[in-house]
Image (cartoon, helix red, strand yellow):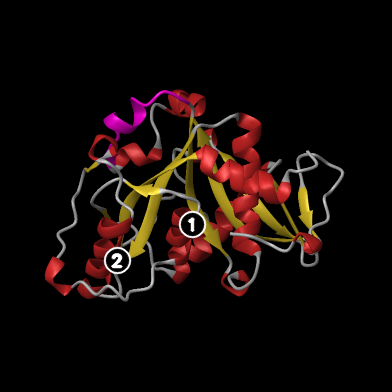
Amino acid sequence: MSMDSANIALNTNKNVTSYKRFSVRLAESAKEIEQCLRLRYRVFAQEMGASLSSNSEGLDQDRFDEFCKHLMVFDNESGKVIATTRLLVSEDANTSGYFYSETEFNLELILNQPGRFLEVGRTCIDPASRKGAVLAILWQGIADFVLKKKVDYLIGCASISLSHGDKYISSIMHVLRKKYFSANDLRVNPLIPLRINRDLADDSIALPTLLKGYLRQGAMICGEPHWDAEFNVADVFVLLPCEKMSRHYLRHFFQQA
């Protein structure tokens, strides 16, 4: 994802990158984290109909949140958080006990790779802000974090809605198998495999926006999907060697760093 550099105005605070109307940075207070959790609830529970396990009304919260950094895109005009994702690095996953992705996949072959991992998850954007530069700005925040923390691999679960029927998920997986699957030595096994009728596949399907964002950076899909009943989605495991993303964003955004 690229953006016209003329629209970028860097904030003097090194922890904040500003794009005129928007800023991207880590949440710094309990109140800001709560705004991220409330946005997640509005998107996942109210919009998508997910049956969340959170004990707090109006919040999407699980056991991993306390170990994560919460990245947010902030609307400087309205004062609202309009996009968020949570970030879990290897050492914090060790403190947690495991990555969230390990609740859905056997990651033995992935985590045996040498290097530092960053798990990206619970990514969402306010419906009113999904057109335009907000997703690219969120990606810029992720790339900045990757560079500062010297991360080697970005990992995560990318969700595909099951509400569009069997043909939709069959077609998405057909395209992923054909163009984006990893080598066999970088495969994962879903803990709850999703049964897919491969005969329904259609090559002309459009991939979901967030998944497409990973793939544009050079990400690989590491096997068949896990069925996430709570969110009614098929999750595929994504692996992105960070040097691919870092080179892309270094060229566009960090020439003066």
Residue displayed at 32% across by 54% down? 235
Q: CA distance from mark 2 to mark 1?
A: 16 Å
- Percent position of residue 200, x then y: 16, 74
Task: Look at discs 2 and 1 and give the one toward the viewer.
Answer: 1
Give the class, few, some or many, for how many residues have Cα within 10 Å of label 2's Cα (few <14, many ≥20): some
Report the span colored magenta: 105-115
Give the secondary structure at mark 1.
helix
- Relative horizontal placement of residue 35, taking residue 86 as reference (left or right): right
Return the residue nearer the eye: 111 or 56.
111
Rendered-image quadrant of the C terminus: top right
On the image, numbered disc 2 is attached to which residue?
172
What amino acid type is highlighted by mark number 2? Ile
Return the residue nearer the eye: 96 or 199.
199
* Magenta span includes 149: no
What label sits on residue 78 in the rendered view? Answer: none
- Percent position of residue 213, x then y: 49, 58
Mark 1 and mark 2 in contact (Cβ < 8 Å)? no
Q: Earlier in the sequence, mark 2 or mark 1?
A: 2
Residue displayed at 43% across by 50% down? 54
On the image, numbered disc 1 is attached to which residue?
216
Give the secondary structure at mark 2.
helix
- Is residue 58 among what the camera can see? no
- Is residue 7 among what the camera can see? yes
- Toward the right, the furthest residue is 12
Residue displayed at 23% across by 51% down? 224
What amino acid type is highlighted by mark number 1? Arg
